[in-house]
Image (cartoon, rainbow, N blue to C red):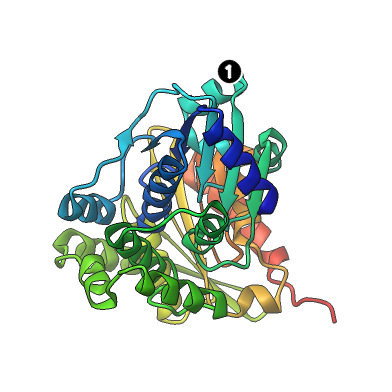
């Protein structure tokens, strides 16, 4: 972190152009990081902008609209330095990933997911901590070193990002609450953050959850329950729902025009008790079928090529091995 902060201070001092990026359909954790880095790097003199490929997710769009902030969608690579946050693989950036490779820009990676080997090899500097409950916590540590000052609106988005990424603090740790305290001191309001993360009831999501339950298939491996289902949208929400109602591991996928989207979640404690790492599973799916994938031990996703049935077969075989109890 010290080396990374020194590097970014020099980048700002030299007047180099910086583009802060995150993954497509960026969530509030990613959005909070983007806004905080854009603000702070600008304060120390960098020429900086922030953006994401494709789009923000629904909640992030809603929050930005309420706060009157903007980030670029599908930004051009008019920069000499790219800071990539909350993104496990550079391939998630689509066409921008090829531009980054071709132009040879300096790449900085800040993430709390398991990063792909290629992404780390391309990075000039990286700070990756899988133990962090949110990317916001890592960015806050960097901001302390950079000496930037958070405004209350950015601190509010960051707090909302922590709330959503930790499942309302279900997956929080001691560092999470230290970060929350820091954001409150910067002017964020916990009550307002809770209001930000509340979305009106979505009837289409309710119907999707019922369809996911109707299509669910149950498997058993090493005394653990694996639940698989197919759904055309809200895959991550459905996987989380299945874990809440009893599955040890839930995998939900969709297939459209030769592209398979898949999300997986694991019950708390399962990864610690077994060899399970869903991020590794998604990386292996991407290698096997072509595409991108990654994530945490207990939550991950991938977008790959092929047929859902083939991806399902591969995933179930891998999970059968990964769910073996850890050796003492």
Crowd rating for badge 1 (residues with CA inside 10 Å; few <14, some 14–19, many 20+): few
Q: Residue at x 59, y 25 (%)?
A: 105
Q: Residue at x 38, y 55 (%)?
A: 32
Q: Secondary structure at mark 1?
A: helix
Q: Is residue 46 left or right of residue 59?
A: right
Q: Tell me the quarter of the image containing the N terminus.
A: bottom right
Return the residue nearer the eye: 319 or 135.
135
Return the residue nearer the eye: 296 or 44.
44
Q: Is residue 144 above or below residue 81?
A: below
Q: Is residue 187 above or below residue 8?
A: below
Residue 317 seen anywhere in this rendered image of the structure: yes
> Residue 217, how many percent across, how many down?
45, 67
Return the residue nearer the eye: 202 or 86.
86
Q: Is residue 148 left or right of residue 103?
A: left
Q: Residue at x 36, y 68 (%)?
A: 186
Q: Residue furthest top?
A: 102
Quadrant of residue 10 in the image? top right
Q: For mark 1, what is the residue?
A: 103
């Amino acid at each position: 972190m010290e080396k990374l902060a020194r590097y970014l201070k020099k980048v700002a001092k030299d007047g180099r152009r910086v583009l802060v990026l995150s993954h497509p359909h960026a969530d509030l954790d990613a959005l909070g990081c983007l806004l905080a880095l854009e603000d702070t790097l600008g304060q120390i003199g960098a020429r900086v902008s922030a953006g994401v490929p494709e789009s923000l997710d629904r909640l992030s769009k809603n929050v930005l609209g309420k706060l009157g902030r903007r980030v670029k969608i599908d930004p051009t690579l008019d920069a000499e330095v790219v800071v990539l946050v909350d993104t496990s693989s550079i391939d998630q950036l689509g066409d921008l990933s090829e531009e980054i490779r071709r132009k040879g820009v300096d790449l900085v990676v800040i993430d709390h997911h398991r990063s792909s080997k290629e992404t780390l090899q391309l990075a000039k500097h990286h700070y990756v901590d899988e133990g962090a409950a949110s990317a916001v916590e890592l960015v806050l540590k960097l901001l302390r070193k950079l000496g930037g000052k958070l405004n209350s609106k950015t601190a509010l988005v960051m707090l909302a990002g922590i709330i959503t990424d930790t499942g309302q603090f279900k997956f929080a740790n001691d560092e999470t609450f230290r970060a929350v305290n820091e954001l409150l001191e910067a002017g964020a309001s916990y009550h307002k953050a809770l209001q930000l993360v509340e979305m009106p009831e979505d009837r289409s999501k309710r119907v999707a959850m019922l369809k996911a339950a109707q299509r669910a298939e149950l498997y058993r491996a090493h005394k653990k329950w694996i639940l698989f289902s197919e759904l055309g949208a809200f895959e991550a929400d459905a996987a989380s729902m299945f874990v809440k109602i009893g599955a040890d591991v839930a995998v939900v996928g969709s297939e459209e025009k030769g592209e398979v989207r898949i999300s997986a979640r694991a019950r708390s404690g399962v990864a610690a008790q077994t060899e399970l790492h869903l991020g590794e599973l998604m990386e292996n799916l991407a290698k096997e079928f072509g595409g991108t994938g990654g994530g945490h031990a207990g939550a991950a996703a991938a977008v790959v090529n092929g047929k859902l049935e083939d991806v399902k077969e591969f995933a179930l075989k891998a999970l059968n091995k990964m769910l073996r109890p850890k050796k003492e």
